[in-house]
Amino acid sequence: GSEQAAVKAGLNYENPGGSLVHSSFDESHNAVRLDLDDLGGEIALLDWGYASDAEPAISPPNRNLQVEKLMNGSVNVVLLRQSTNAQTNQLSKRLTLLENNEFIKPLLDDVKDPVLADIRDIPRICNDIQQDWRTVGLNRMTAWNLANC
C-alpha cells in the first residue's frame, strides 16, 4: 500500500546528508527505515542540533536515555518507550535496508491506466505465486513458521 510506496519514493536520489548510519552498520551508504513500536508507545526524538550544541536537546528527566547517531553523526536519535515491557535493541539492528534490498522493488513506471495494468498483471502474479510455492522461498518459510507458532 501507501507505506511501501512512500519508502520507495526517494530511492533513486543521492542522500544529501551522506551516510545514513554509523560506519559500524554494514550498509552505511544506503537508505534505511526505522519502524517504531507503536504498541509499546515508542516515540523518537530526531535532533539535528546547532553548531554550538554539545549535547542533544533532551529534557532533564530523559537524559539517561541512550543517544544514537545517524547521518555521519549529524543527527541524534533518542527512542523512548512508554511500555516497560519493550525490549531495548541496538538501533542498527532495527533498521530496514531500503536500497540494495532484493525484497524491495523500485516503483514501476507510470502508465495511462493503472487499473487496467493491474488487471492485466493478475495472471502473471498468480503464476509467480504458484512458482514461489514450488521452491523453498519466503512464502513457504513464512507458512512453516506460522504453522509452528
Image (spheres, rainbow, N blue to C red):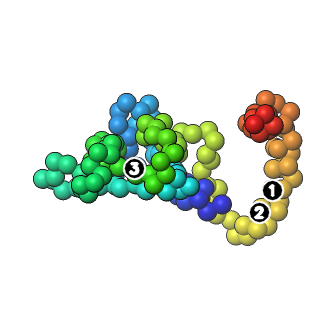
SS at circle 1: helix
Q: Is residue 117 visible?
A: yes
Asked if marks 3 and 1 touch (Cβ < 8 Å), the reply is: no
Residue placed at 55% from the left, 59% from the top?
Answer: 6
Q: In front of the other: label 3 or label 2?
A: 3
Residue 67: percent from left, percent from top: 31, 44
Query: In the rendered image, which quarter contains the N terminus?
Result: bottom right
Q: Which mark is residue 82?
A: none
Q: Which residue is mark 1?
A: 121
| Spatial separation of the CA atoms under disc 3 and disc 2 | 42 Å
Badge 1: few (under 14), some or many (20 or more) residues near its Cα, within 10 Å? few
Residue 19: percent from left, percent from top: 36, 42
Identify which residue, 139 or 145, lies in the foreground: 145
Query: In the rendered image, which quarter contains the C terminus?
Result: top right
Identify which residue, 14 or 95, lies in the foreground: 95
Kind of residue indicated by mark 1: Asp
Residue 50 shown left or right of residue 17 in the figure: left
| Spatial separation of the CA atoms under disc 3 and disc 1 | 41 Å
**First reached walking from the N terminus: tag 3 or tag 2:** 3
| Spatial separation of the CA atoms under disc 2 and disc 1 | 6 Å
Q: Which residue is mark 2?
A: 117
Q: Which mark is residue 79?
A: 3
Instruction: Name above or below for residue 25 compared with residue 4.
Output: above
